[in-house]
Image (tube, rainbow, N blue to C red):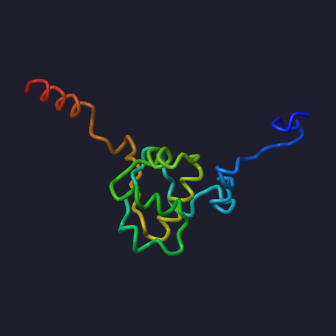
Amino acid sequence: MDPMRQAPDDDVWHDDEAGPVVRPYAMTRGRTAPARGEFDLISLVVATRSVPSLAAGLQPEHITIMRLAQRPLSVAEVAGHLTLPLGIVRVLLGDLLDKGYILAREPQPTSHMPPERIFKAVINGLRSL
């Protein structure tokens, strides 16, 4: 048998350069729902303080979220930057919200939106400029 060729029974789960593989649910200790907050895709999150004062006791993903959230970002943007499933990001955001490290603003229900005529008036006003 060719020594460069692996036997079919040798399953390779990761290569040496990739390092250990951590399943997303391990990041949340098996939790599937956030401790607080709903975190719709378009909900905005923003950090309440800077990252260096928070580094102790937080997972690397929490710290990354804190760095990203120094300016308001949507939950979808946070998930995209972290390349993690949305459910995992929601749990991590819930941890930060529960500790007071972020603020979250849920989208306004359509019943609280201004009437359509207001939007049309704004658009017509902008067109006339």
| Residue farthest to the right, as pictured | 1
Q: Is residue 80 above or below residue 58?
A: above
Task: Say which of 117 and 35 sits in front.
Answer: 35
In the picture, measured across the screen, residue 95 lies left or right of residue 119, that is: right
Q: How many marks?
A: 0
Task: Say which of 39 and 114 sits in front.
Answer: 39
In the picture, measured across the screen, residue 50 lies left or right of residue 25, that is: left
Q: Is residue 61 above or below residue 2?
A: below
Query: How far across and how far down the image is residue 12, in percent?
Result: 78, 44
Q: Is residue 72 above or below residue 96?
A: above
- Residue at the spot x=69%, y=55% of the render? 20
Q: Is residue 76 above or below residue 103?
A: above
Task: Say which of 42 and 2 sits in front.
Answer: 2
Within the image, what quadrant is residue 116 found in? top left
Query: How far across and how far down the image is residue 128, in percent?
Result: 9, 24
Quarter containing the C terminus: top left
In the picture, measured across the screen, residue 55 lies left or right of residue 25, that is: left
- Residue at the spot x=23%, y=32% of the render? 119
Query: How far across and how far down the image is residue 61, in percent?
Result: 53, 59
Within the image, what quadrant is residue 46 found in? bottom left
Task: Say which of 103 and 119 sits in front.
Answer: 103
Quarter containing the N terminus: top right
- Residue at the spot x=37%, y=47% of the render? 108
In the picture, measured across the screen, residue 17 lies left or right of residue 64, that is: right
Query: How far across and how far down the image is residue 113, in percent?
Result: 31, 41
